[in-house]
Image (cartoon, grey):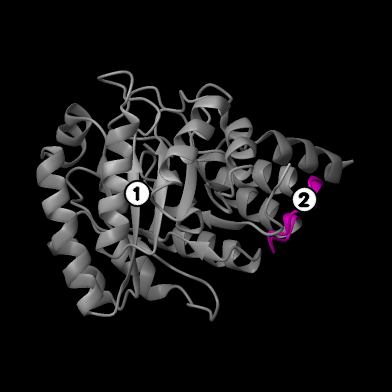
Amino acid sequence: MNFPGQVKIVEVGPRDGLQNEAVTVPAEIKVQLVEKLADAGLPVIEVGAFVSPKWVPQMATSGEVFRQITRRDGIGYPMLVPNLKGLELAHAAGVREIALFAATTETFSQKNTNCSIAESIDRFNAVIDAALRLDIRVRGYISCVLGCPYEGEVSMDTVLMLAEKMFDRGCYEVSLGDTIGVGTAGQAQALVEKLARHVPVPQLAAHFHDTYGQALANIHAVMQCGIAVIDSSVAGLGGCPYAKGATGNVATEDVVYMLQGMGIDTGVDMDKLLEAGRFISDFLGREPVSRAATALLRKQAG
């Protein structure tokens, strides 16, 4: 099997991980979390989102958090933006990298962004064009690539269409999101194989939720296709406010443990990663949703 020798982990805990939490996480806790993740060696940390606080109140302090963190050389600190207004706020805060998103079904698109797929394409095209003029890098997310909570099965042709449009317009990377975690290894691999005929594999990333316990298997499968960028969330935090029942992203600790066991370099210090996961889990008042973290912390405790 051909696996990449090195994998870049995109840590989405501070944004995707916290956005659906019922307990309000204050800015100072988010700042500490980002700093601890940076200490652990995560090369990309998604800090927050410039979205309407009416719809995602947890992200209301994102600008404050971004301004307070110590931005270190060699680490990317993207912010999610849904539209030109979000880009304007990001630019004013000094953000140098953004992420934007689109969905594969009309129902999810309406629920998530209050627009059709066609309208979402027009919207992200405008954001990409404006961001690139400002010399801001752009990453694209595609939601529900392996299933939709409202419409069920998803057409791979739709995923391909969105990925091509994002890449051709100027996204340096397109992340494929199994938002409700229904996909299996064979499906994930088939999707990447289809997309790889049209979009360079080095520009594709995998973003798997672990609702059905399939995330690590899916990651293992798509790495065989050349995928070397994996999104994950410390302590398995996360869920989607527009996908009922979707549990957290795959835990960063579980991904790092698997990759280390395969001899694949991530640059991540597991002990410091465990510290970051323990920190945010303690604040939220629960155990990390990570098998590796649970086992390693128990081992440390003796």
Residue 296 % position (x, y)? 79, 42
Instruction: Locate residue 112 relative to residue 217 in the image: left or right.
Output: left
Residue 92 % position (x, y)? 22, 77
**Crowdedness near tag 1: few (<14), some (14–19) or many (≥20) residues, C-alpha within 10 Å:** many
Q: Is 5 included in the stretch rendered in magenta? A: no
Q: Is 264 included in the stretch rendered in magenta? A: yes
- Residue where numbered disc 1 is placed: 141
- Residue where numbered disc 2 is placed: 260
Q: Residue furthest right?
A: 302
What's the residue at 10%, 40% (across, down)? 115
> Which stretch is magenta?
261-270
What's the residue at 49%, 53% (across, down)? 201
Q: Reply above or below: 267 against 253.
A: below
Q: Reply above or below: 8 against 54.
A: below
Q: Which of disc 1 and disc 2 is earlier in sequence?
A: 1
Task: State whether the magenta stretch is mostly helix, strand or loop.
Answer: loop
Q: Reply above or below: 190 against 222.
A: above
Instruction: Locate residue 28 relative to residue 99 in the image: left or right.
Output: right
Label count reads 2
What's the residue at 67%, 41% (across, down)? 254
Instruction: Locate residue 177 relative to residue 290 in the image: left or right.
Output: left
Q: Reply above or below: 206 against 178.
A: below
Say which quarter of the image contains residue 213.
top right
| Secondary structure type for disc 2 | helix
Tell me the distance, in whole angstroms, between the alpha carbons under discs 2 and 1: 26 Å
Say which quarter of the image contains residue 139.
bottom left
| Secondary structure type for disc 1 | strand
Instruction: Locate residue 282 relative to residue 83 in the image: left or right.
Output: right
Q: Which mark is residue 82?
A: none
Q: From this viewpoint, is residue 289 visible?
A: no
